[in-house]
Amino acid sequence: MRARSIAAWAQEPELAELEFDVTLLEALEGKHPMYTFGVWLYNWIQRTMPRLHHIYFNILEVFPSCKSAKYMPGHKEFLKKIEALRPDVVVSVHDHLNHGFFELARMAFPENPPPCITYCGELFGGYGFSRHWVNNKADYFMGAVKETCLAAEKLKMQHVRNEEVGFMLGPQFSKEKLTSEERAAYIRSEWSLDPERFILLLGTGANGANNHCVLLDALRKAGVHPQVVALCGRDEAALKAVEAWGQEHPEIPVKALGYTLDMARIFQCASAIVARPGTGTTSESIVSECPIIFNGIGGIMPQELITVKFFKKHRVDFVMRRPSRLPRIVKSWMDNPGAFDAVKRSISHLPYRHNPAAILKKFHAFGATKR
């Protein structure tokens, strides 16, 4: 998501004079059987049994596969691609791309290596913040929030090469916010719902991890009837299941959505969202000032724990480890609008920055030093 956001911002008119040419390299998935298996296993764990990821995470912390360029599977192919691209700057947005891949980028151009920069979107340090995020030989470390940079500092990233730069979200999250009239019109026309009533957004991860029907059943059994919009992504089975559920239980109005790029407006039109504590969706909810209920069913993965820690530090953490917890939270907000408004104000007061254009200008400045 962050890589795509960088590429999208490079095409924005306000940055046209910088003449960006951004190439996205998926350095792990599909490049070598070992990496492909690792990505598949991660996705399977997230969808089926998140608690298992504590084992997977700790194995990777001890036995990194991308620590040294010399012993990395598929390193020759990556080296050829870097040599052909001749980049002015290399940016990593994944914790396993900050060592061996940076080394390969420098090996490709030993006399004039491209600056290698890490952009880290994690929200807190401690257990769950991978030590692989930090490479003391990298040219720069950019963190989403202050806590990210503090975590990097504890892993010996020098202060002079460690900067809080804010969230990296797509351009749509920086556009002018909807007015109340525009919000109401969108809800009526796109969702056929009532803009005056509470709207709960059920989120899904990029890999299709969701508990939509289980959560809908929990709301129905508890007699809590918000309006619901369910994001199903490219999961056709999930979309059909939610639509069938809505037809069977009309007391809870349900709108199922397939894959969409309209997330900024969706967040603005929802009252609150239920989602796994991933940094992408969480960052979007913060910028949109949309309260988030963290879906902890099946356990919370290590890198999700640090997201919850950030919210807990700022006293806006709402974690649902069992489906029965959701109706209680939603009912308390529906029955007490004043308390819900206080939650929204707390979200709006979270300490963060959001200026992706400024981040790209920093990338450009590093690239200019190479030329």
Image (cartoon, rainbow, N blue to C red):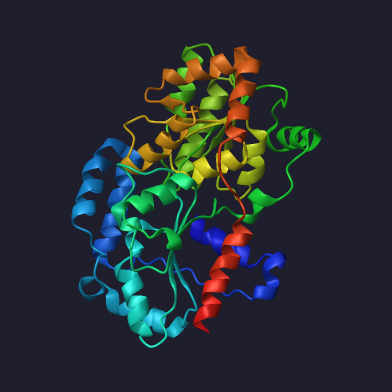
Percent from the top left, x then y, of residue 351?
Answer: 55, 40
Percent from the top left, x then y, of residue 242?
Answer: 51, 32
Compared with residue 224, is residue 183 higher up or lower down, i.e. above or below? below
Residue sticking out furthest to the right: 181
Q: Is residue 228 visible?
A: no
Task: Between residue 98 and residue 199, name the one nearer to us.
Answer: 98
Residue 290, image quadrant:
top right
Compared with residue 156, is residue 223 higher up or lower down, i.e. above or below? above
Residue sticking out furthest to the bottom: 111
- Measuring 51% from the left and 26% from the top, which residue is drawn there? 245
Compared with residue 9, is residue 312 higher up or lower down, i.e. above or below? above
Give the side of residue 126 with respect to residue 281, left or right.
left
Q: How many numbered marks appear?
A: 0
Percent from the top left, x then y, of residue 259?
Answer: 55, 48
- Measuring 24% from the left and 39% from the top, which residue is drawn there? 52
Give the side of residue 71 with respect to residue 102, left or right.
left
